[in-house]
Amino acid sequence: MPAVTADTLALPRIAALPETGTTWRPVARVVTAHRQLEGEGFVVRRPFPGADLALADPFLLLDHMGAVEYAPGEAKGTPWHPHRGFETVTYMIDGAFEHQDTTGGGGLITDGATQWMTAGAGLQHIETPPEQLVVRGGLFHGVQLWVNLPAAQKWVPPRYQDIEAHDVALLASDDGASLIRVIAGELDWHAGPGVTYTPITYLHATVAPGSRLRLRWPPAFNALVYVLAGRGHAGVEDRPLDEGQLAVFGAGDAIVLRATVAQPLAARRGWEVLVLGGLPIREQVARYGPFVMNTREEIIQAVQDFQAGRMGTVPVARMPHRTSADEPAQPPDR
Ligand code: MN
């Protein structure tokens, strides 16, 4: 159950959509996330990328971590690894993830907080559960989203935004039943705290059992809905959408979701969904593991820069994890 909750009756409500003149986006396809082993051996569910790389543009990757109740000694993170050419957005729904990087940045992302890291020209970082979670075990539930940068901004200096749980804009649906957390971008003229190079909207909604959530959506944005927990239906055609599934919407200016009345225990407050949209960049994408550039030559340069130590130096007083000397010559994905 998400750490950030609220009394929806006390929140500002988004405006109801007009009966006429609204073009509901159809569900173009439903994708079931595949399971993938990441970092030092934690399982993620990854709805994209899949076969069609352009499907999520401007988003590159979504990793759903947990929800998992770790036993003592079980929690794992990533070794030090580089990134270049895009932004990683880590949203911790429950639990905590610690972070450190080669520019001196770092901190704890915990219970509803988001860390927005613009890798830009490049750095190395490590993402790991805090020692207390490793020792004692506990609940861990989060997502990491990769947002692409257009060619003109791939070389910007690395930047961080630490978005605390209380910074997130909280709204209620038009019927007052469902909770909407605006992490980045805008919904119905309410802005979230995340600042992006590429215009996007990033929401986490808890749709009350049996309720509908109707959202006005910018026609120029794509529209993706990923289910964190629970079950419901997407679109006016009522396509079933369960935990671990992604709905990709077609063209239009609004989306509708409906939560099933009966929900599993993990979704007892409602159907937990991420709603994502952004302005497609529509540029050639060359990607190799943790580097996302426009051309093959830029990827070769990124690998050479990493191997030559031009993407930062792992600090001596680093976290008690593997050192860069243990790293494979080919960097891992995350
Ligand atoms: Mn990473």
Image (cartoon, helix red, strand yellow):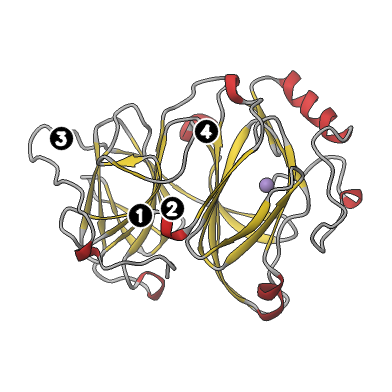
Q: Earlier in the sequence, mark 2 or mark 3?
A: 3
Using residue 255 as the reference point, say whether residue 44 is left or right of it. right
Q: Residue under label 2, please give it.
A: 245
Q: In front: 76, or 242?
A: 76
Q: Position of residue 277 (x, y in %)?
A: 39, 38
Mark 2 and 4 residues: CB-CB less than 8 Å, in contact? no
Between circles 1 and 3, the one closer to the viewer is 3
Between circles 4 and 3, the one closer to the viewer is 3
Q: Earlier in the sequence, mark 2 or mark 4?
A: 4
**Mark identifier at residue 52:** 4
Mark 2 and 3 residues: CB-CB less than 8 Å, in contact? no
- Residue 153 visible in the shown view: yes
* Local crowd size for mark 4, using a 10 Å CA cut-off: few (<14), some (14–19), many (≥20): few
Using residue 324 as the reference point, say whether residue 49 is left or right of it. left
**Mark identifier at residue 241:** 1
Q: Earlier in the sequence, mark 4 or mark 3?
A: 3
Label 3 SS: loop
Look at the picture and state if 69 lies above or below 256.
below
Mark 2 and 1 residues: CB-CB less than 8 Å, in contact? yes
Q: Earlier in the sequence, mark 1 or mark 3?
A: 3
Q: Earlier in the sequence, mark 1 or mark 4?
A: 4
Q: Residue under label 3, please give it.
A: 22
**Label 2 – label 1 distance at C-alpha:** 6 Å
**Label 1 – label 4 distance at C-alpha:** 20 Å
What count of labels does the image hold? Answer: 4
